[in-house]
């Protein structure tokens, strides 16, 4: 799938389905998931949850024309605990003094070395698409900046869905400098996109942390009657698919099991 303005929507639909497969990968005991032709799995991402337990957190796919790096969102209690560790720490992988969410950064850091090593084995002349949903969107944003600065893939394309805020205003500014092709799909009724708040204060402490979203916002608006249903990747896929139902239907027919069909694919 070549990237152009004419197929930007189809790219968003396709990558939402890819994000759905990160949950399938995690939920299957053998780690299997549906890989659409002609893509092949080149790396499985393993990262430590906040309790330091190793979990699968996504994968890298390669096709003749491109690469896809996909991060999984929240499916376990430990991940939600990580989401709540909203104090900040220095994002040490770039020279600029920016601060990022401590919980998200801890998970990303545990996967970083193997992730960059896997990318170094792949052809840097191919476009790299990075994607993720929920917590996975936060990991994707951290990864996109790190990869743009510290790998041969200097111009990654980032597509995220239902992303929380990831870092401070300086992080958002520096992110825009290095990652210039970024789309953040956010449902106005998705509470995860409002977290952490722009000003976060730990209980019983005076220290305040400031958060800003990275750009560029691709606003959406859908209300499915429940907090979880307004956030899950299946809902994002369904809403985007309404704008090009023929393309979505083609994906479903070509690759059975690839497209999200259950809005409860993630445990909210």
Image (cartoon, rainbow, N blue to C red):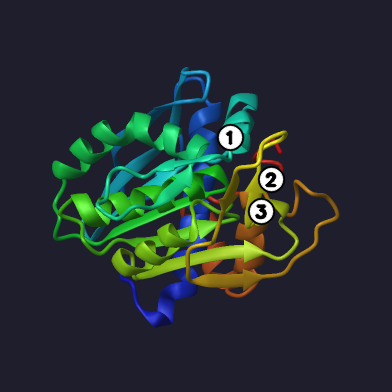
Q: Nearer the viewer's eye, disc 1 or disc 2?
A: 1
The residue to which callout 3 is attached is 197
Answer few, some or many: residues within 10 Å of disc 3's Cα (few below 14, many 20 plus, some between 14 and 19). some
Mark 1 residue element: loop
Mark 3 residue element: loop
- Compare marks 1 and 2 and give the one earlier in the sequence: 1
Q: In the orientation shown, which residue stands out farthest toward the bottom?
A: 6
Answer few, some or many: residues within 10 Å of disc 1's Cα (few below 14, many 20 plus, some between 14 and 19). some
Distance between the alpha carbons at the discs numbered 1 and 3: 13 Å
Q: In the orientation shown, which residue stands out farthest toward the right?
A: 225
Instruction: Please name the residue shown 50% across and 44% down the image.
Output: 136
Distance between the alpha carbons at the discs numbered 1 and 2: 29 Å
Image quadrant where one finds the N terminus: bottom left
Q: Nearer the viewer, residue 20 or 150?
A: 150
Tally of marks: 3
- Compare marks 3 and 2 and give the one earlier in the sequence: 3
Numbered tag placed on residue 85 in the rendering: 1
Above or below: residue 59 compared with residue 226: above
> Residue 61's x, y, as percent?
31, 46
Image quadrant where one finds the C terminus: top right
> Residue 118's x, y, as percent?
21, 38
> Residue 37's x, y, as percent?
34, 51
Can residue 25 be seen in this snapshot?
Answer: yes
> Residue 266's x, y, as percent?
65, 39
Q: Are marks 1 and 2 in contact (CB under 8 Å)?
A: no
Q: In the orientation shown, which residue stands out farthest toward the front?
A: 206
Q: Nearer the viewer's eye, disc 3 or disc 2?
A: 3
The residue to which callout 2 is attached is 262
Distance between the alpha carbons at the discs numbered 3 and 2: 29 Å
């Amino acid at each position: 799938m070549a990237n152009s303005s004419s197929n930007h929507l189809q790219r968003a639909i396709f990558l939402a389905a890819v994000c759905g497969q990160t949950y399938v990968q995690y939920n299957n005991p053998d780690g299997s998931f549906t890989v659409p032709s002609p893509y092949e799995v080149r790396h499985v991402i393993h990262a430590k949850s906040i309790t330091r337990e190793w979990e699968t957190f996504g994968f890298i796919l390669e096709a003749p024309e491109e690469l896809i790096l996909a991060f999984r969102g929240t499916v376990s209690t430990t991940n939600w605990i990580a989401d709540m560790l909203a104090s900040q720490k220095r994002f040490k992988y770039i020279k600029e003094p920016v601060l990022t969410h401590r919980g998200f950064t801890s998970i990303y850091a545990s996967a970083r070395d193997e992730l960059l090593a896997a990318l170094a084995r792949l052809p840097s002349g191919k476009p790299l698409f990075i994607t993720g949903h929920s917590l996975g969107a936060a990991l994707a944003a951290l990864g996109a900046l790190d990869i743009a600065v510290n790998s041969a893939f200097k111009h990654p394309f980032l597509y995220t869905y239902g992303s929380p805020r990831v870092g401070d205003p300086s992080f958002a500014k520096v992110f825009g400098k290095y990652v210039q092709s970024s789309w953040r799909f956010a449902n106005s009724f998705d509470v995860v996109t409002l977290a952490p708040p722009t000003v976060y204060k730990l209980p019983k402490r005076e220290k305040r942390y400031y958060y800003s979203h990275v750009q560029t916002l691709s606003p959406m608006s859908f209300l499915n009657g429940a907090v979880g249903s307004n956030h899950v990747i299946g809902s994002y896929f369904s809403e985007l698919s309404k704008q090009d139902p023929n393309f979505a239907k083609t994906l479903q027919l070509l690759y059975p099991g690839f497209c999200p069909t259950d809005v409860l694919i993630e445990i909210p």
